[in-house]
Amino acid sequence: MLTKAYIPYKGYYSTPFSRWQGSFANEHAIIFAANTSKRWFTQKKWDPAMFDYLFLGITIGQPQWFYGSPWAAALIGAAGIPGVLLSQACTTSTTCIFQAAVGIETGFYKNAYCLMTDRCSNGPHTVWPNPNGPGGEVLSENWMMDNFGRDPWAKGAMIQTAENVAKEAGITREECDVVGLRRYEQYMDSSANDKAFKKRYMFPAEVSLSKKKTIVVEDDEGITPCTKEGLAALKTVLPDGTHTFGTQTHPADGNCAVVVTTREKAKELSSDSKIEVRIVSYGYARTKKGFMAMAVVPAVKMALENAGITIKDVKAIKTHNPFVANDIYLARQMNVDVNNFNNYGSSLIYGHPQAPTAGRCIIEGIEEVAMLGGGYLLWGGCAAGDTAAGLVLKIG
């Protein structure tokens, strides 16, 4: 259990997420995130020189990302601080936040900045020389599509892992459609009353189209409206599967950031010093080959055990749910109602830009628990390689 690592209330933001090949498709992910952070600091009237370490979470390579965190630190206005680049697929945000929390807990850092960003659009293609290839043939990889399409260890595509879990657990196509529609309805709640919930944490993104034209993106792009009839009419992605394009996520672009600091500094930076946000515990797991969605259960159980609480003590649950089967399996195993978590949105609906996905989910969870008067937040999500992570925070 952690006792000294805190997040200032409102000491975080997420940009809107833009569907693959949308408004953010040509933005350099590191520069885009740094520029967004600078604008956010200006609005908050914060000096980025207060940070002593930067955790840069990113999973898809960008030009000169070799310089990673130190470059990002300089771009945000904290040129004097070092940092590290972390990449843990879909749980990258969780890894950044937890590692920052451990640093605060041990006194290694005083104020850490976690900046998570990715651009799935227009991803890189890596080419390696192949000395054994005839006629100068090369080895090549499309960073995003090739890795979505094949796990080098389990050998299957990402969606196959979800279908493996659905088949073993007896999850039906009809169940997937019902929960998929519920997740869409929950997301739409965040847009009610002139996007009141989103405005609690979402920070507009600026995209420069030319020297004379800049656009401001204030809301998620590429959300597909869902109806019961529309979902039922879709074909499954795999011939014998349970998931359609309506019950799995889509690639996206965006960034988010979270400040991790001491209790005293968190109170100073908080927009409401009466609301404390403490990072309590972390969990991790790896499940059997090709059953990625199953890993979330032991990961969240570890996080709960490390926090000294049970699922009954949790006020809100947020998950990274690239496939609906993830949530159905978790709900069954943890004996919770699948309809009652992921309020106000989830990656199934607003998309999955890899590194910032979990961060946005956690930020939404903090705001939900704050609205409910405080309590424990549980986050859980899977990641490539049949792994998963869990995180417990206490709000209020």
Image: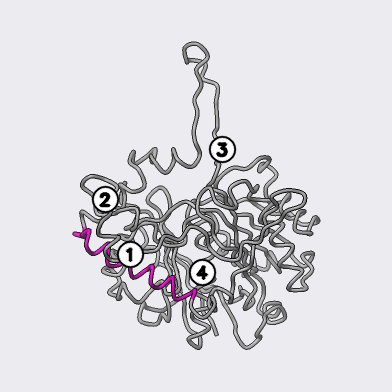
Q: Nearer the viewer, residue 190 or 357?
A: 190
Visible residue check, residue 305: no
Q: Which mark is residue 256?
A: none
Is label 3 in contact with label 4 (beta carbons under 8 Å)?
A: no
Q: Measure the C-alpha gap from mark 4 to mark 2.
A: 30 Å
Dot 2 lies on which element? loop
Location of mark 2 (residue): 236
Q: Which residues are magenta?
A: 169-191
Count of numbered marks: 4
Q: Which mark is residue 124?
A: 3
Q: Position of residue 112 (x, y in %)?
A: 68, 65
* For residue 108, side relative to residue 306 (left or right): right
* Main secondary structure found in the magenta portion: helix
Location of residue 262 (image quadrant): bottom right
From this viewpoint, which residue is outermost toward the left?
A: 170
Location of mark 4 (residue): 362
Residue 15 included in the magenta stretch of the image: no
Location of mark 1 (residue): 180
Is label 3 in contact with label 2 (beta carbons under 8 Å)?
A: no
Q: Measure the C-alpha gap from mark 4 to mark 1.
A: 20 Å
Rendered-image quadrant of the C terminus: bottom right
Q: Measure the C-alpha gap from mark 3 to mark 4.
A: 28 Å
Q: Position of residue 49 (x, y in %)?
A: 79, 64
Q: Position of residue 211 (x, y in %)?
A: 77, 49
Q: Earlier in the sequence, mark 3 or mark 2?
A: 3
Q: Nearer the viewer, mark 3 or mark 2?
A: 2
Q: Earlier in the sequence, mark 3 or mark 4?
A: 3
**Residue in the image at 44% along x and 72% along y:** 188
Q: Measure the C-alpha gap from mark 1 to mark 3.
A: 31 Å
Residue 172 included in the magenta stretch of the image: yes
Q: Position of residue 368 (x, y in %)?
A: 49, 79
What is the three-letter code of the residue carrying label 2? Answer: Thr
